[in-house]
Image: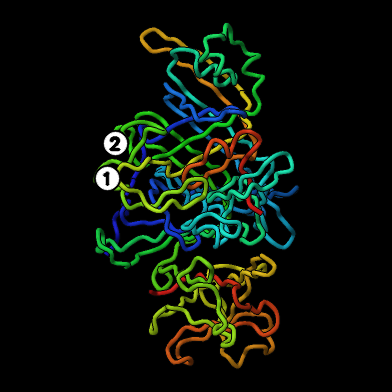
Amino acid sequence: MIGAVRQGQVEIYIVGPNDSSYDIAWRLTGCTITADLTREALAELGHLSPYDRPLTLPIPITATIDTTAGDLENWSKVADQLSAFDAGTLDDLDLADLMASEDLKLVVMVYAQTDEEAGGTYANRTVMAAGSLIGQSYWIDGTDMDIYAEGDREYPLKTIVVEHLKITDEGATLDMGANMTQTFGFRSTNDLYVVKGAVSVGNITGGLQIRRNT
Amino acid sequence: MARNRIIYASQSVWVNGEVLYRVQSLGSTTTFTSEDIFELGHLDIVDIVDDVPAVAVTLNTNDFGDVRTLATLAQLAPAKIVMEATATNSNANLAVVSGTALTETGTYLHGVALADFAITCGALPGVTLWAPVQDECALGTLDNLIDQALFLDEVFVNSLEFGYTTGANATENYGAETDNKMWLLNDGKFVNWEAWTANSTQGVLDGTDISNGYVDLTLASGTTIAALSTNSATQRGFLRKDDNGAPAITWYDASENEVMNVEIMLGALADVGQAGFVGKYIYELPATTGGVHRIHFPDATYIPVATDGLEILFAADA
């Protein structure tokens, strides 16, 4: 029985449109995803109360990411230039780089075990011996994978995907006596999906995306 | 004896028949709007006109890796909310698609999309939320004695937020709005939910139900569906309302993928199709049915067929 999850059970990923693997975003201290489901109260003569409150579309989504500033890896991810950053060939990053990205995805993976219980993060996660996950069902890309056994790789309980992020703000702050912080704010519309289990990166990149089933 | 307090362990939260887990707080705050009417020639107030009350609902939960709360509030179709088998075209709410034409790839996913909150086909426009308060003497037990129940109908979710912060529990918080709120107590304090849907213990309506022309509630003999203060002599405490404000039950028309609230009146088998009962469901008291609470189907319109659904929500003394 999981009552709540803490930082060791949540992994955040900023995924580029052509990424072929998940690369966890480190030094994040907070991530908030908000959807504004504004309703329009429809009134009619004869009824005091509205007869319906349909949802206003498109649905605005905001996402904020708070980090403890270190290297510029997160900047390069938001600029969709991680490969150049990793290769050491990235010489500068400016606001235009952040503004150029319009198809980033924010992915949140929520796990049952902490990273310490699982012996690692993402692909290094395994089901610990005598853990409560043993015997529990798990899902990968919608497929019921039967039940966990000790030593199996652990997959997320659920995966949140927010598509086509557009940056709205960023900020770096260094105060006397405090660590430097780097924040990023994004907006999106409509495309927030909460999926049971794991979603392979190949199902949200390379032209693939999640939508409602007909 | 007066009850002096209510604590977290005493109140649970239900939405459309599903209990919600890891709820940390439930709030419902009403703002009453009224206008004082004056007129030329008089100093004194002439009248006070009420506008519709606005009830703001907050539902704060811990994110514990489950999608059930979100799926319940988004009113996924009964077959798609189960999520207990491999996702297929028939049981999955999400699909992986390709290209600008959104061509399905054949991969299906269980889950919820924001757009589900905009969908009204196959679901009522808002959810029904209630929160029974357990009797104080039953605190810490599995006893289902209830003191009172908070009841909100046609609740529309208007915000959601997922929060992940170091040093704090992950949160999954919702805001909602409605225009009604009711406390049920005494003979109406038990909010009962009985449903014949793909996801209910009763299952969908089957051939026997259809040929019988009725379904029987599981509510025990000797118990009573309350007569609420707004009920006429031919009405009982069925908590959903049709367009005219009359007590109603909810009929899911599978062929049209449409849901509507249909009026239900007190009566008997002989009343089916009679003047005043046409197109209405009829609730027959146990006294004339051999001890069961029976719901007769209408005669002409709104007649369910096999695989349709019924949701019956009522206030009773058990």
Asked if B304 appears above or below B100 in the picture, the reply is below
Question: Would residue B153 be visible to someone looking at this image?
Answer: yes
Asked if B65 appears above or below B153 in the picture, the reply is above
Q: In this view of the protein, which residue sits in the foreground, B190 or B193?
A: B193
The local crowd at label 2, few if under 14, some if 14 to 19, many if 20 or more residues have their Cα within 10 Å, is some
* Residue position for label 2: A117
Question: Would residue B34 be visible to someone looking at this image?
Answer: no
Residue B188: which quarter of the image?
Answer: bottom left
- Which residue sits at x=57%, y=82%? B207
Q: Element at badge 2?
A: helix
* Quarter of the picture holding the N terminus of chain B: bottom left
Image mark for residue A42: none
- Which residue sits at x=28%, y=66%? B143
Position of A63 compared to B84: left or right? Answer: right
| Three-letter residue code for mark 1 | Gly
Q: Position of residue B307 (x, y in %)?
A: 59, 73
Q: Are marks 2 and 1 on the same chain?
A: yes
Q: Are marks 2 and 1 in contact (CB under 8 Å)?
A: yes
CA–CA distance between discs 2 and 1?
9 Å
* Residue position for label 1: A131
Asked if B145 appears above or below A113 in the picture, the reply is below
Residue B123: which quarter of the image?
Answer: bottom right
- Which residue sits at x=73%, y=57%? A44
Q: Element at badge 1?
A: loop
- Which residue sits at x=58%, y=7%? A92
Chain for disc number 1: A
Q: Position of residue B22 (x, y in %)?
A: 38, 48
Query: Number of marks in the image?
Result: 2
The local crowd at label 1, few if under 14, some if 14 to 19, many if 20 or more residues have their Cα within 10 Å, is few
| Three-letter residue code for mark 2 | Glu
